[in-house]
Image: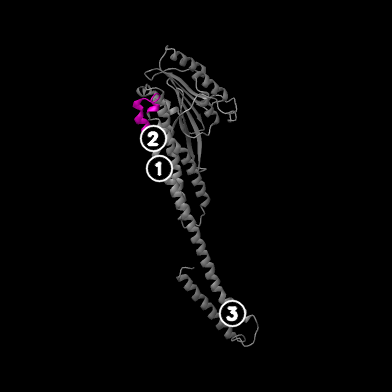
Amino acid sequence: MLSDRPNETSPTNAPTRPTCDNAGVIIDAAWYDASGARIHEPDSVGALGALLAQSRAGEVDGFAWLGLRMPTESELGAVQKEFDIPQLAIEDARELHDRPKVERHDSMLLTVVPTARYDDEREAVEFGELFLYCGADYLVSMRYGQAAPLSGVRSALEHDHERLARGPGAVLQAALAQVVASYEPVIDGLEGDVREVERDVFSEARAQPTRRIYFLIREVLDFLVALEPLSAAVSTLTSSRCSPWVHSELTPLFRDVEEQLAEIVGRTHNAHQLLNNVLNANLAQVSLRQNDDTRKISAWAAIGVFPTVIAGLFGMNLDGIPGADSEIGFLVVTVLTLALCYLLYRNFKRSGWL
């Protein structure tokens, strides 16, 4: 849901991002005029902020689009100063691991979106976060993690001036569409692995995929936990409260993103349900195999009982045992014992115990 948060400082015990000296955190920075054309390429946050000041003074028109990846503490401070972003909104980017949300901070809209990609070799979902700060004349994106780069979004929009002319809201929509589209390979990979464990469970091989099933359930649940709150957040972007940032002509595009996200969430729910069914089927298969093993052991034990008893009687060296003192008698007893064992074997085989 959309919430209003005042411009206030965060608690002093909130975790902060350690400073670092990584270069190249600015992915791209540009100024676009009212027609959507790229007319300036500032080389720093300060230069882009100067253009923003000129725009607010009425000297130029258009908006700024700044893309950052893993910004340092100094970069966050510079962005906050040049774009006049409320302190509380910047603190969200410092803390990370926030839930998907859309929040209004004075004249700015903050959208937090989880990013994800699937490592098929490890069968694990790698998560990141994307912070989108949308003002009337700027859009700042901060990406943490490897998933969902926005370079393709910028390139596509720069070839669609009519759409880019609708302002920062168009960038916000395109960025959300890119992130949601990046979820498709993730759910495709998860569904592929679910089909593999399903085949393993019902195969003739005596494999034990229980551990793999549990790990897949965990990954599917983590993915679901990340996506479900995002559905509510995206739906708020089409409400009237977001109209200062979202052009009315962009509303259908946001609804398309919402529908695509709902489809992915539904597929994730189905994958989770199927994994639970596969787990139950696997446990049933294990129980059946254990019963089958028990019957086989019992059948062979029953077959071995008769010759064991006969051998025990002859080994007692007692007088009066038929055939004990005769080679023919011993041969007859041995043949009868083997014949009885064979009959028992046939009966157990016919009944499915062997």
- Secondary structure category for the residue under label 1: helix
Marks 2/3: CA distance?
79 Å
In the image, 105 versus 340, the foreground residue is: 105
Other-residue count near label 2 (Cα within 10 Å), few / some / many at <14 / 14–19 / ≥20 = many
In the image, 36 versus 167, the foreground residue is: 167
Q: Which residue is mark 1?
A: 266
Q: Main secondary structure of the magenta part?
A: helix
Amino acid carrying label 1: it is Gly
Marks 1/3: CA distance?
67 Å
Magenta highlight range: 240-260
Q: Residue at x 47, y 34 (%)?
A: 100
Q: Which mark is on residue 258?
A: 2
- The answer to whether any part of residue 309 appears in the image is yes
Picture coordinates of residue 136, whole percent (x, y): 42, 21
Q: What is the number of callouts on the image?
A: 3
Q: Which residue is mark 3?
A: 310
